[in-house]
Image (tube, rainbow, N blue to C red):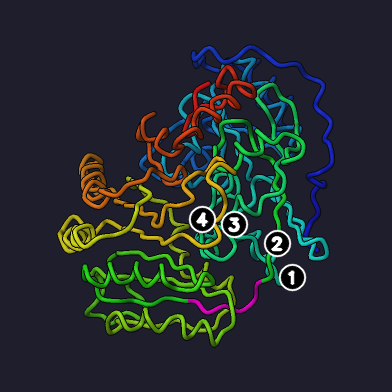
Amino acid sequence: MTAPVADPAAPIASPAVSAAPAPSGVRPALSERDLDAIRAAVGDVLVAGDPGFETGRLAHNRAFDRRPAVIVRPSSATEVARAVLAARDLGLDIAVRGGGHSVAGLSTIDGGMLIDLGAMRAIDIDPVRGTGTAQGGVTAGEYTAAAFRHGFVTPFGDAATVGLGGLTLGGGVGWLSRKHGMTIDSLLAVDLVTADGELRTVTDASDPDLFWALRGGGGNFGIATGFRYRLVPMSTVTGGMLVLPLTARVLVDLVEASMEAPEELTQITMVMGLPPAPFVPAELVGTAAVVVMPVHSGDLDVGAAAMAPFRALATPLADMVGPMPYIGMYQLTAGAAEPGPAVVRTAMLGGLDLAAAEAIVAHHTSPEGAATMTQVRVLGGAMSRVPADATAFAHRQAPVLTAVMAGITGEPAAARSAADGLLGEISASAMGAYSNFLGDEGPARVRAAYPGGTWERLVAVKRRLDPANVFHANQNIRP
C-alpha cells in the first residue's frame, strides 16, 4: 500500500478554538502581531518577500494576477481549521488551492488568506476493500498512479496535475464517464472543515443533504481535506490519439459516432492547431485539426472494433490508437500542466448540429483561432443513468459538454470576445453550464450550472453550513 491517511469514516477531534465573527469584507494590512497569530495556528506561512511567495501566489490560469496578504500551507486538517478561524479573526477573505487549476482564477486571492493544501498529499489504496483515500492536496495523476499499481483507478478527468478537490467537488468528467460515471459517482466520503472550524467526515449516512451538495456544488460548504473513493479495476485499455482533418462534417459525424459507441468508449475531442511532435508532419504543424483521445475500457478486440467508425470518418492525419496502460493517457495531456493565460467558456449542449460545427471550423481556420482550443465531450452512458436530483451535478441528460479555451496572446478583451463569440455560435442547444469549466462570468452563469430545484436546495445547505458566506472565493452560491 501507499502512504496511509486516517480512515475517512473515523471521527476527527476538533481543535480547541472557537468560531470568530464572519469577515467584514475589509482587508487590513497584516501586522507582525497578526502574522504571529497565523504562524501559531499554521506553521508554514508565506508573505510578500519570502522565498516561494511569488510562485505560490500564482494561479495556473495566468490571466489572474492576484496577491494574497498571506499564504498558509497546512500539514493537517487541524491546521486547516485553525487557519480558517485565524482568517475570520483577522477579517481576511479565504481562497483555497488544491491543484490550482481553477479556470476562473479562484485558487488565489487579492489581499486575503490563500490556504494551499499542497503539503497534504497522503494516499492510501486498499485493493481488498476496493477503496482509495487521498488528502486534499493530491492531484489526479498522483492518485491514479498509486491506484493503478494495484490494478485499479477512480474515474477522474483528463489532466494529471489537476487537484482532486476542485475536480471532485465540481463533478468530475473524464475518460471513464460513460462506463463508470463521474468522479462524484465513486465518492464515498469527504473530510470537511466548515466555516466555524469544525472537522467533519461527511457521508450519505452522516449528512445526506450536505453529501448531496458536495457532489457538484463546489467549494461553497467548507474546505475538503480528504476524500474516500470507490475503485474500479483497470489495466490495459484501447486508447491514444486519432488526428482527423477539420471539417464540419467530421465534427458532426464524430459526435454521432461517439453517441452510438459502446459505453466502454468515452472520447474527448480537442479542435486545435497541431503542435510540433514526432507524429505530426512538418507541413501540418499549426494546422487546425480534430484530435480525438478515446479510451475503451473493455476487451481489446472489442475496443479495436469500436474504433472502426471513427477511423472511417476521414483519412487520419495520425493514428496512435491501440492497446496501452490506462495511466498512459495522462502523457497525452501533459501540456495541460503548463500554466498560461486564457479565457474559458463552457456549455452543456443538446448535440452538435452542422451550423455549430461550421462555426467551429470557421473560427479555428481564422487568424484568431490559432490561440484557441475547443473541447467537445460526448457524455451519456452510466453518468446519465444517475437521477438528476441524486447529486448537485444535475446535467445528467446533457449529451455533449463543450469548452472554448482562448489563449491570451495580446489584449485580454480580444480573447474574451473570441471565446464569447464562438460559444454563442455553438450553444443554440445549451442546457446549462459545467461549474468546473466556468470562468469569472458572474452570478447568472453560476446559476446556469444548477438547474431546476438544484439551486434552491444548494442555497438551503449553504445557509445551514455557511450563513456568513465565509467561503465565497468560488463559483459562489450565496446563502
Q: Amino acid at mark 2?
A: Leu
Q: If you read the primary sequence from the N terminus, does the residue marked by circle 1 or circle 2 appear first? A: 1
Q: What residue type is disc 3 on?
A: Ala
Residue at image mark 2: 231
Q: In the figure, is residue 148 to the left or right of 183?
A: right
Q: CA distance from mark 1 to mark 3?
A: 16 Å
Q: Are marks 1 and 2 in contact (CB under 8 Å)?
A: yes
Per the model, the C-alpha gap separating discs 3 and 2 is 14 Å
Q: In front of the other: label 1 or label 2?
A: 2
On whether residue 64 falls in the magenta region, the answer is no
Q: Which residues are magenta?
A: 234-239
Q: Judge the density around disc 1: few (<14), some (14-19), many (≥20) Cα neighbours within 10 Å.
A: some
Tell me which residue sits at (52%, 79%) in the image: 238
Sort mark 4 into few (<14), some (14-19) or many (20+) by Cα contacts within 10 Å: some
Q: Nearer the viewer, residue 414 or 236?
A: 236
Distance from disc 4 to disc 2, alpha carbons, whole Å, reads: 20 Å
Cα distance between the residues tagged 3 and 4? 23 Å
The amino acid marked with disc number 1 is His
Does the magenta segment cover residue 238? yes
Instruction: Provide the residue designation for mark 4.
Output: 384
